[in-house]
């Protein structure tokens, strides 16, 4: 249809539009379409988070319970998981995968300068431990989470609540220790001292703060290298020393027995303190091969929240649990409820706005019914006349559709900045699924109103 003809038809069919009805329909359409697009964007972001961070999975740590007094546990070997025990755990319902904790086999002391080595404040000194888990069980893996033997620092990941304890527990009670943001904690100097005599020194840096694993983590290849280079040759065991059928003195460690030339030169018997009746000559005890134990702790990824049967099975096996991230499940349910609620309300408002638009333009066509009939009798087709009314509708709807996309985009940027504080990374732009949904929404909306307008024009003829 040429522009002069379109202009002529537009002037002939000009009539006063019901402004109140169109305003209500436009407002409902803006709110409804925005809610639908936001629900689709939230759904897309949550699915991406589930895929990349495994949000919603339940992570459980297992360890064997520690029982007995100080004397018994002083010489007791580490309670590690054997292969057959791990296989038994894998068969429990809901277990998707299992990872083991690897720990340091050497003493570690750490110096931390919260205010920097040059400046106010003092160093915090603490004896520490290191562990590692397979990277697939980490809730975040920054680019700095890697280590090479010639690297200048060791990346360290600590629980987020360690930082909270520092800021809200230790720092307020010590004037020399300032409160620390994540950025400040990640930049403060850390010195790692390895060995009984603290002779080997390395630099460290906090690179992440985990909300899933309650441990001080380092990369697995660093811990493997450090254990091979600085680890103890054998697991420390303690023995009673027997002489003349009596126990003499306090329990003695394996390393001290090996160093004591006086005991080694005499006919001495020893027995492990966990089994005092099992006496043996000292040379046999020194030749005992250390047990090649498995991991002392396990981390389990489960496809759903642990059931009562699962927890009961663990109790029967004598294992203790520490559920990591117990809020994931109800947070996931809350997100789903929010998505469906927004989509439901948005769909209802969109349906109401479609009905209002349809009735408004049906009224506009009815007001121009006599002119419409005359134009049809003059040879103009109902399709050309319908296009005049559709052009008016398209101008209104294009503005509404663009405004809804703009609102959704702004809210997405604001949300991405807001959740970044909690360690959740979201892209700033709208997903292609949201854009595709917006296009589909526009097509359906326009198609329905086009049918209504075309039917109203044909009824006039």
Image (spheres, helix red, strand yellow):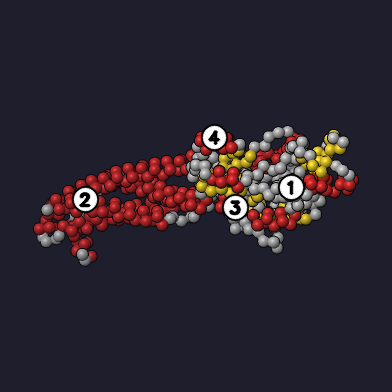
Label 1: which secondary element? loop
Dots 4, 2 in contact, CB < 8 A: no
In terms of sequence position, does the residue under pointer 4 or pointer 1 come before the other?
1
In front: mark 4 or mark 3? 4
Label 4: which secondary element? helix
Is residue 108 visible in the rendered image? The answer is no
Q: Which residue is mark 3?
A: 134
Label 3: which secondary element? loop
Label 2: which secondary element? helix
On screen, 145 above or below 88?
Answer: below
* Gap in angstroms between the C-alphas marked 3 and 1: 24 Å
At label 4, counting other C-alpha atoms closer than 10 Å, the crowd grade (few under 14, some 14-19, many 20 or more) is: few
Q: Which residue is mark 4?
A: 312
* Residue nearest the observer in this picture, 350 or 254: 254
At label 1, counting other C-alpha atoms closer than 10 Å, the crowd grade (few under 14, some 14-19, many 20 or more) is: some
* Gap in angstroms between the C-alphas marked 3 and 2: 61 Å
* Gap in angstroms between the C-alphas marked 4 and 1: 32 Å
Q: State the residue at coordinates (43%, 43%).
A: 336
Pick out the residue farthest to the left. Answer: 377
| In this picture, residue 238 sits left or right of residue 298 | right
In front: mark 3 or mark 2? 3
In terms of sequence position, does the residue under pointer 1 or pointer 2 come before the other?
1
In terms of sequence position, does the residue under pointer 3 or pointer 2 come before the other?
3
Q: State the residue at coordinates (79%, 42%).
A: 280
* Gap in angstroms between the C-alphas marked 1 and 2: 83 Å
Q: Which residue is mark 1?
A: 235
At label 2, counting other C-alpha atoms closer than 10 Å, the crowd grade (few under 14, some 14-19, many 20 or more) is: some
| In this picture, residue 174 sits left or right of residue 101 | right
In front: mark 1 or mark 2? 1
Q: State the residue at coordinates (69%, 43%).
A: 78
Q: Which residue is mark 2?
A: 452
- Location of the N terminus (image quadrant): bottom left
């Amino acid at each position: 249809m040429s522009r002069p003809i379109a202009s002529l038809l537009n002037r002939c069919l000009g009539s006063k539009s019901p402004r109140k009805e169109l305003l209500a329909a436009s407002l409902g359409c803006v709110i409804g379409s925005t809610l639908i697009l936001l629900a689709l964007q939230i759904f897309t972001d949550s699915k991406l988070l589930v895929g990349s961070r495994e949000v919603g999975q339940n992570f459980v740590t297992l360890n064997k319970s520690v029982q007995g007094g100080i004397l018994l546990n002083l010489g007791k070997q580490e309670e590690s998981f054997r292969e057959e025990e791990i296989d038994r755990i894998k068969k429990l319902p809901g277990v998707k995968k299992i990872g083991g904790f690897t720990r340091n086999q050497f003493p570690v002391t750490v110096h931390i300068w919260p205010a920097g080595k040059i400046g106010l404040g003092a160093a915090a000194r603490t004896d520490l431990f290191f562990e590692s888990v397979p990277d697939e069980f980490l809730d975040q893996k920054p680019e700095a989470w890697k280590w090479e033997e010639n690297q200048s620092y060791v990346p360290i990941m600590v629980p987020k609540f360690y930082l909270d304890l520092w800021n809200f527990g230790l720092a307020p009670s010590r004037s020399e220790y300032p409160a620390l943001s994540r950025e400040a904690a990640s930049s403060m100097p850390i010195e790692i001292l390895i060995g009984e005599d603290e002779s080997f020194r390395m630099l460290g840096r906090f690179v992440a703060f985990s909300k899933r694993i309650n441990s001080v983590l380092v990369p697995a290849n660093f811990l493997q290298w450090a254990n091979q280079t600085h680890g103890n040759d054998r697991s420390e065991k303690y023995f009673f020393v027997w002489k003349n059928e009596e126990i003499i003195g306090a329990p003695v460690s394996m390393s001290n027995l090996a160093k004591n030339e006086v005991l080694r030169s005499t006919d001495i018997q020893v027995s492990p303190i966990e089994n005092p009746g099992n006496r043996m000559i000292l040379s046999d005890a020194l030749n005992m091969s250390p047990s090649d134990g498995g991991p002392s702790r396990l981390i389990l990824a489960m496809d759903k929240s642990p059931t009562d049967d699962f927890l009961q099975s663990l109790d029967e096996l004598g294992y203790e649990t520490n559920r990591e991230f117990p809020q994931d499940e109800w947070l996931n349910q809350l997100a789903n409820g929010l998505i469906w609620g927004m989509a439901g309300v948005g769909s209802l408002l969109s349906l109401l706005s479609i009905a209002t638009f349809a009735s408004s333009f049906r009224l506009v066509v009815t007001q121009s019914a006599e002119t419409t009939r005359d134009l049809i009798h003059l040879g103009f087709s109902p399709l050309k006349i319908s296009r005049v009314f559709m052009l008016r509708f398209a101008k209104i709807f294009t503005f509404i559709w663009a405004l809804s996309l703009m609102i959704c985009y702004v809210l997405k940027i604001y949300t991405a900045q807001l959740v970044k504080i909690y360690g959740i990374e979201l892209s700033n732009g709208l997903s292609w699924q949201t854009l595709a949904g917006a296009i589909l929404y526009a097509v359906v909306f326009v198609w329905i109103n086009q049918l209504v307008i075309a039917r109203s024009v044909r009824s006039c003829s």
